[in-house]
């Protein structure tokens, strides 16, 4: 089973910014997104289930200062 990734408008701007100004972070973000499509609850990036997320909201580290926060709907 694979999942569909939908970005908020703000997230699209950040991804575009990373692509231009931070190619290392963009490369890691691309790897994380490719993995999220298949395995959103396991994998690389220091996976964390966020409090009050009811097992829906997770985050993964892109770098020491940046992370991606996402929600998982459906199984």
Image (cartoon, rainbow, N blue to C red):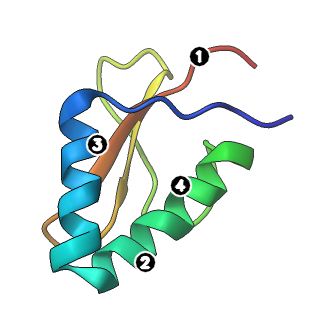
Numbered label attached to residue 73? 1
Answer left or right for 66 relative to 60.
left
Evaluate whether residue 45 shows in this view.
Answer: no
Q: Reply above or below: 15 against 70.
A: below
Spatial CA span between label 3 and label 4? 13 Å
**Percent from the top left, x then y, of residue 5?**
55, 34
Mark 2 in CB contact with mark 4 (< 8 angstroms): no
Answer left or right for 38 relative to 8.
right
Q: Which residue is drawn at the image coordinates 42% and 63% (left, top)? A: 46
| Kind of element beneath mark 3 | helix
Evaluate whether residue 64 shows in this view.
Answer: yes
Mark 1 in CB contact with mark 2 (< 8 angstroms): no
Numbered label attached to residue 9? none
Q: Nearer the viewer, mark 1 or mark 2?
A: 2
Q: Which residue is drawn at the image coordinates 59% and 16% (left, top)? A: 73
Q: Which residue is denoted by mark 3 in the rendering?
A: 12
Spatial CA span between label 1 and label 4? 16 Å
Spatial CA span between label 1 and label 2? 26 Å
Numbered label attached to residue 33? 4
Quarter of the picture containing the N terminus is top right
Disc 2 packing (10 Å; few <14; some 14–19; many ≥20): some
Q: Nearer the viewer, residue 3 or 15?
A: 15
Q: Which residue is denoted by mark 2 in the rendering?
A: 27
Answer left or right for 18 relative to 57.
left
């Amino acid at each position: 089973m694979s999942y569909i990734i939908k970005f908020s408008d703000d997230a699209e701007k950040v991804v575009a910014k990373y692509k231009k100004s931070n190619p290392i972070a963009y490369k890691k973000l691309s790897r994380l997104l490719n993995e999220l499509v298949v395995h959103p609850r396991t994998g690389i990036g220091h996976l964390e289930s966020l409090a009050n997320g009811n097992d829906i909201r997770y985050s993964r580290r892109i770098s020491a200062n940046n992370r991606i926060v996402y929600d998982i709907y459906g199984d």
